Image (spheres, rainbow, N blue to C red):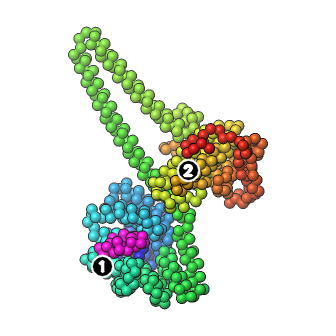
Amino acid sequence: MPAYISDGPMRRPAFFLFVATSLCVANRLVAQDPLRLRACLDSCTEAKEIGDYEAALRHADMAFAEASALGDTVAMPTVLVRRSELRQYKGDFFGALTDLYDALRLYEKNKDEDGLATVYNHIGAVHHYDRNYAEAGRFYASSLAIRERQGNQQERALLYGNIGSLLEDLGRPDSALTYHRRNLQIRRTLGDGRWIGISLSNLGSCFEKSGQPDSARHYLEAGLAFIRKEPGEFLLGQTLTMLGKARLRAGALREALAHCTAGLRIAERLRTLPQQEACFDCLYRANSALGRTSEALIMLERLTAARDSMFGRERAKGLVRLELNYAFERQQYADSLRRLEEKRLADIASEQRVSRERDQKRLFLFSSIGVLLLAIGLWSRLRFMRRSRSLVRKERDRSESLLLNILPKPIADELKANGRAAAREVDGVSILFTDFHDFTRMSERLSAHELVAEIDACFRAFDGIAAKRGLEKIKTIGDAYMCAGGLPEPRRDSARDTVLAALDMQDWLKARAQERTGKGLPFFTMRAGIHTGPVVAGIVGDSKFQYDIWGDTVNTAAHMESAGAVGEVNISEATFNLLKDEPGLSFSPRGRVAVKSKGEMAMFFARRRDGTARTGELPGSPAPL
């Protein structure tokens, strides 16, 4: 059975739901009121209990708006967790994970250990549904460690069941049985009939996967008997589907059809996409085995649509970027803490040093007689001043270096002189966008650490190439890289240097691919696009300065990249007109290519002319090109 994320509240009378809903949608002109927040949460709970997940999601959105308006940092993560649960039921894993990471940041800020354990379990469940089993196991283990410290029996049982289900999906049913039995033992001690039924169903699923159909049927039917006594259809639908899959593997095809059809009716009523996907799979296999070709084809088409909706490439890429962004934020936070601690220790050492030197100075002053001791005191003071000036100079140079690493030198000079840097229009800027091809496939073959290390190696090489060609790096966004030639001041050969930089990057990736292929490692390929035109350049924000550019030229350059081809450098007609007579380059016209929101645009592939030498070894290259 899929992972469970909470025990869930008990049902309330329908009249209470009517009152809570009325309070929740009351006049929005009234001052923000904690009572309305509570009413929205209760309405969300009641709508979920009766299976109306659309209404529950609307109430969750209103509850989060109320909590945000109140500035209630305790209620906000609670609402986010509840909203993520509803999104998960509907198969919106990206939205669920976004809410959970927002909640995680708030719980970390509040130092709420109980909230952290809850969020870890929910994140693990999303990864479990998304078949990212390694990440699911890591988050389940983090949640279980907290629950075992707390001694919370009910939450421990929930995690035992989730870990057991994960081991089932990993093809380890014997190990899974241990956790499911621990779960059942606690549930029987607590006397919760609904969860006893769920635990029995999990045991049945486990026996079915270990090739024991009779035991599987016994436990699944026992679990179904318990669950039928409880209100709500969600668990009933899941158990019917599990029973249908067990009968399918046992060869009882018509029983499998009956159970999975009943489960599908419930899933369609509740609009729970993950449960529908499981039913479609069961019905497709049963109809195929019975020779019912047309019915099997219909189920296969619906199964494919459901899986594309839940596990499409763009959603998978979004999930990976969420994980990378969160890991990057955590690293930045850790680095900030480390720097603060280093500064604190340096301040303490400086104060102690100053204190010692002050005491020495006083000792010399009170014990000195004559000009000799006075001279010694003056010499000591001079040495102290030299040290202080040296420390100040080092700190100033360090700050200067850091500022120049973030901003172009003219912009940094203007910022230091005036306290701000005005935005300016710059003509003839050539913007280069790159994006790794098939990034999702690479992320599935590499661990998070290996993936970030490989991206870092590529972007360090790109930084060296951009600096060598006189380009200004703008930013990176996930697996995309952006730089520009002709900034912060226009430069005559900036378009040529930008194209050569893009070709250098493609050459570096090809050499990198040869090296990693020889070691049996996966490698990146990429698209690159360039467009030349006017931009507005400047600094945004009052803190964490970032030099950025805006304008239609930026959007057109991004379209050049997305409309390009792997291993090629795709340029616009404007860039081509500047470089068409360049002796070291050749161009392959592509005709006019349709571009979203732009219509058709002329594009060209830029390449080096045969026999043209590359200038020097590329930065970070694994071997000379």
Q: Tell me if I can see residue 218 in this picture.
A: yes
Q: Which is more toward the observer, 362 or 68? A: 362
Give x and y (percent) for residue 487: 63, 40
Give x and y (percent) for residue 560: 67, 53
**Is 234 left or right of 426, judged from the image as shown?**
left
The amino acid pointed to by label 1 is Asp
Residue bearing mark 1: 192
Residue pictured at 40% horizontal, 80% vertical: 211
Residue bearing mark 2: 515
Q: Tell me: residue 289, above or below residue 538.
A: below
Q: Quadrant of the N terminus?
A: bottom left
Spatial distance from mark 2 to mark 1, Cα to Cα? Answer: 59 Å
Give x and y (percent) for residue 325: 48, 54
Residue pictured at 59% horizontal, 57% vertical: 437
The boundaries of the magenta stretch are 160-184
The amino acid pointed to by label 2 is Glu
Q: Which is more toward the observer, 74 or 205? A: 205
Q: Is label 2 or label 1 in front? A: 2
Residue 169 in the magenta stretch? The answer is: yes
Q: Tell me: residue 380, above or below residue 268.
A: above
Q: Quadrant of residue 139?
A: bottom left
Disc 2 element? helix
